[in-house]
Amino acid sequence: MTIGLFGLAVTLLALVIATGMVAFGVLAPKQRAAFGGNALVDDPDRVLTPLQVFEIQFTDYRQIAQSLLARNARKARALERAYLALFVAVVSAALTVGGILAWRLDQAGTWPL
């Protein structure tokens, strides 16, 4: 029965790791850049021309886009690790069931090979 307990422990551990990676690495809310903290928001009287407004907007939107790309890349890496942990759980469960089945067939003397 050692095979079953060991396999169950490995399978459950891999499932817990996969779930944690998905919950905390992918689904949990993260900080991201937001529009603000510039002359247009903080001191609009200082911004005099449409070109100045455009420059401020362009800079902020570029920073927001870069922060979203970095955040999405982190989430993608966490999801890849979760897929790997889930794969380990499935393989572990299959090996455990196969091991228990082989052990029981051997005990019963009905080993087909």
Image: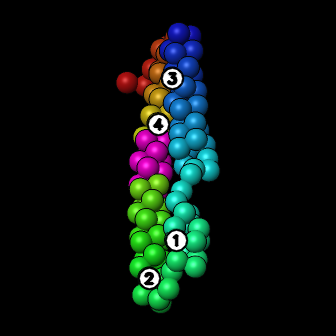
Q: Secondary structure at mark 4?
A: helix
Estimate the spatial distance between the alpha carbons at disc 3 and disc 2, rounded to whole Å.
59 Å
Estimate the spatial distance between the alpha carbons at disc 2 and disc 4, rounded to whole Å.
50 Å
Query: Label 4 near label 2: C-beta < 8 Å?
Result: no
Q: Is residue 94 visible?
A: no
Q: Nearer the viewer, mark 2 or mark 4?
A: 2
Q: Amino acid at mark 3?
A: Val
- Image location of residue 7, percent across then percent down: 51, 21
Pick whichever of labels 1 and 3 is earlier in the sequence: 3
Q: Nearer the viewer, mark 4 or mark 1?
A: 1
Query: Magenta segment: does it hold 10?
Result: no
Judging by the rendered image, the residue that carries numbered circle 4 is 85
- Image location of residue 23, percent across then percent down: 61, 43
Q: Nearer the viewer, mark 3 or mark 4?
A: 4
Q: Secondary structure at mark 3?
A: helix
Judging by the rendered image, the residue that carries numbered circle 1 is 39
The kind of secondary structure the magenta stretch mainly shows is helix
**What residue is at 54 percent from the left and 25 percent from the top?**
13
Picture disc at residue 52: 2
Magenta stretch bounds:
72-83
Q: Give the class, few, some or many, for how many residues have Cα within 10 Å of label 1's Cα (few <14, many ≥20).
A: some
Pick whichever of labels 3 and 4 is earlier in the sequence: 3
Q: Quadrant of the N terminus?
A: top right
Q: Nearer the viewer, mark 3 or mark 2?
A: 2
